[in-house]
Image (cartoon, rainbow, N blue to C red):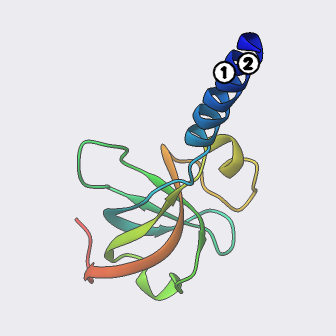
Amino acid sequence: MKNLMIAVLVAAFAFTVSAQEKKAPREHSMTGCLQKGSEPDSYMLTNVEGNGPKTIGVVSSTANLAPHVGHKIEVTGVAVPASQAEAEKNVPKAEHYMRLSGIKMISTSCP
């Protein structure tokens, strides 16, 4: 009986740890200059501010990005693993990849 209780506790602990590791990516925001990618309907951010990555490949966006090419924008979204992003042909190679849920124009020009 004691061994059964220990086995149940170990299984519950393993399930809890596994569930914590599979959390959905957190939404975050980054600011940079929107550029057109080399493929049709592909975009990336360059000159990204802060200490993190300096380029972001846009995997997808709910916002229409075309009117903002050449603008400094803030993007909000979730990170996409490089292996998943690079498997798609329309995603430009970058240091970081995001699926965008929103954008905010900061300036009509970029540095």
Residue at image point 67% right, 34% down = 15
Which quarter of the figure has residue 48? bottom left
Which quarter of the figure has residue 20? top right
Q: Is residue 7 above or below residue 31?
A: above
Do residues under tags 1 and 2 come within 8 Å of each other at their CB atoms? yes
Q: Nearer the viewer, residue 6 or 77?
A: 6
Q: Is residue 52 above or below residue 14?
A: below
Whether residue 41 sits left or right of residue 75 in the image: it is right
Tag of residue 39: none
Q: Secondary structure under badge 1?
A: helix
Q: Nearer the viewer, residue 28 or 34?
A: 28
Number of marks: 2
x and y percent of residue 91 in the render? 65, 58
Q: Nearer the viewer, residue 69 or 99?
A: 99
Q: Which residue is mark 2?
A: 7
Tag of residue 10: 1
Residue at image point 73% right, 18% down = 7
